[in-house]
């Protein structure tokens, strides 16, 4: 039974039925909540057919009807479209209703609510920090009590409790800063990897150059990102003011480290990387260094897309420019990623885990730096990675959504024939890491 008076008549409205909207509709309706939902009118018949067997879900033609009928309305639309959609449907919001959004960037969302919602409407936003195909149980769910009574906030918590997520309480500004810290640079790294491999016309898992656990993570998560919708990453990067400086610094770190490698400046490279290591991971004799590794030994080694590479070929030494640049970026901006673990995504925990592995495994970092100076095996890929990182940073600085979409789409098309099977392997990798977290 729902835990507040009158809950049996409480209607949850969903405006936007993309992947996350559908996940919310299924989870909330299965828990007994009545759902009114809509997307663009041309999708009405398709959604009616898809949700015809969900007795607690009613598909309506537009957001006006959802807004008038619902006690709690969640806008689950692209961050770039939130202002336009709220301007269209916000004035129809039911008297005394609660309204929130599910976008990954709260700055434009809150501005849209303040501008277009009636003053008698409470505002409680949320953000599930995972993708639509990840089990929400145990994952972070940010709740933002922006303009609401305690009673309204309690109702929102009661509705979303069925997801089984860990509730994290933040302001909109705190949310944007932390999501930038835990997602912006991570996404930029994988997006740049995809562009680099695309530029060199290679599927990296088909050869013998990218073998082993760290390479498995790079390849699987790159494919996972390019298998998603472009706007998920564009909105976070372009609309989140906190993300701009981070993506710019990541491009700068990548470029400067690559120059040190090209010019053979061994001592400067080592001094810079080791200084970043100490700032991010702590000194080797500090209590921070003694913490449990995020990734148990071998947990990602078995997730190769190339079955012939399993156990047959030792990994080629790699300078791991992407990982070095990540830590250099965090160091330059004073970011300690462990401070935000309560709000971390599965992808971020996996990426931080392999980065931690590289920097904390005896001898591995020194080998990485040696390769960066002496070995040209990955030089072409590193060049294209550096170009790509700068390209994404410029795109963000100029707030170019269309350029972002085009850059993303052409690389997505290159890898698209290989998505089948790869996404499943990526999912299995993430599940294995999440399971190891519980041990």
Image (cartoon, grey):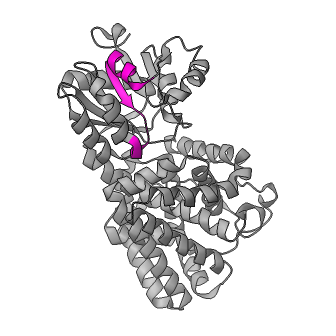
Residue 279 falls in image quadrant: bottom left
Residue 288 falls in image quadrant: bottom left
At 46% from the left and 17% from the top, the residue drawn is 31
* Residue 141 in sight in this render: no
Q: Position of residue 296 (x, y in %)?
A: 56, 53
The residue closer to the viewer here, 274 or 170, is: 170
At 25% from the left and 26% from the top, the residue drawn is 153
* Residue 335 in sight in this render: yes
Q: Position of residue 36 (x, y in %)?
A: 43, 18
Q: Position of residue 106 (x, y in %)?
A: 32, 44
Horizontal side, residue 101 vs residue 387: left or right = left
The residue closer to the viewer here, 191 or 364, is: 191
Instruction: Tell whether position 63 is magenta.
Output: yes
Instruction: Tell whether position 197 is magenta.
Output: no
Quadrant showing the N terminus: top left
Q: Position of residue 353 (x, y in %)?
A: 51, 57
Rendered view: 367 above or below 334:
below
At 44% from the left and 88% from the top, the residue drawn is 268
The residue closer to the viewer here, 93 or 329, is: 93
Give, as a single range, the part of the protein colored magenta: 62-81
Rendered view: 20 above or below 327:
above
């Amino acid at each position: 039974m729902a835990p507040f008076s009158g809950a049996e008549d409480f209607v949850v409205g969903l405006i936007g039925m993309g992947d996350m909207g559908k996940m919310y509709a299924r989870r909330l309706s299965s828990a007994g909540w009545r759902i009114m939902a809509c997307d663009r009118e041309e999708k009405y018949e398709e959604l009616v057919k898809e949700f015809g067997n969900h007795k607690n879900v009613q598909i309506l033609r537009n957001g006006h009807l959802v807004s008038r009928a619902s006690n709690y309305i969640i806008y689950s639309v692209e961050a770039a479209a939130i202002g336009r959609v709220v301007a269209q449907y916000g004035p129809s919001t039911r008297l005394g209703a609660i309204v929130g959004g599910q976008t990954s960037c709260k700055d434009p969302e809150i501005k849209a609510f303040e501008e277009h919602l009636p003053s008698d409407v409470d505002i409680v936003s949320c953000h599930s920090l995972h993708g639509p195909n990840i089990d929400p149980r145990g994952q972070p769910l940010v709740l933002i009590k922006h303009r609401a009574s305690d009673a309204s906030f309690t109702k929102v918590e009661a509705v979303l409790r069925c997801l089984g997520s860990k509730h994290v309480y933040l302001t909109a500004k705190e949310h944007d800063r932390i999501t930038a810290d835990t997602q912006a640079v991570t996404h930029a790294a994988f997006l740049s990897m995809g562009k680099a491999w695309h530029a060199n016309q290679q599927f990296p898992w088909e050869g013998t150059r990218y073998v082993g656990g760290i390479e498995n993570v790079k390849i699987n998560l790159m494919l996972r990102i390019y298998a998603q919708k472009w706007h998920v990453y564009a909105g976070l990067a372009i609309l989140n003011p906190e993300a701009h400086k981070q993506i710019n610094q990541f491009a700068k770190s990548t470029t400067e480290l690559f120059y040190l490698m090209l010019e053979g400046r061994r001592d400067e490279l080592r001094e810079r990387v080791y200084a970043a290591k100490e700032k991010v991971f702590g000194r080797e004799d500090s209590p921070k260094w003694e913490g449990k590794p995020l990734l148990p030994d071998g947990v990602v080694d078995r997730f190769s897309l190339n079955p012939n590479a399993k156990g047959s070929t030792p990994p080629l030494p790699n300078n791991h420019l992407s990982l070095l640049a990540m830590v250099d970026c965090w160091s330059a901006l004073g970011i300690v990623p462990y401070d935000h673990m309560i709000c971390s995504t599965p992808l971020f925990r996996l990426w931080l885990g392999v980065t931690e592995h590289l920097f904390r495994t005896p001898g591995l970092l020194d080998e990485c730096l040696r390769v960066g100076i002496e070995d040209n095996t990955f030089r072409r890929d590193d060049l294209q990675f550096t170009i790509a990182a700068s390209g994404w940073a410029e795109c963000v600085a100029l707030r170019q959504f269309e350029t972002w979409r085009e850059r993303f789409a052409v690389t997505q098309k290159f890898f698209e024939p290989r998505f089948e099977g790869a996404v499943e392997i990526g999912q299995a990798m993430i599940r294995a890491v999440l399971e190891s977290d519980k041990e």
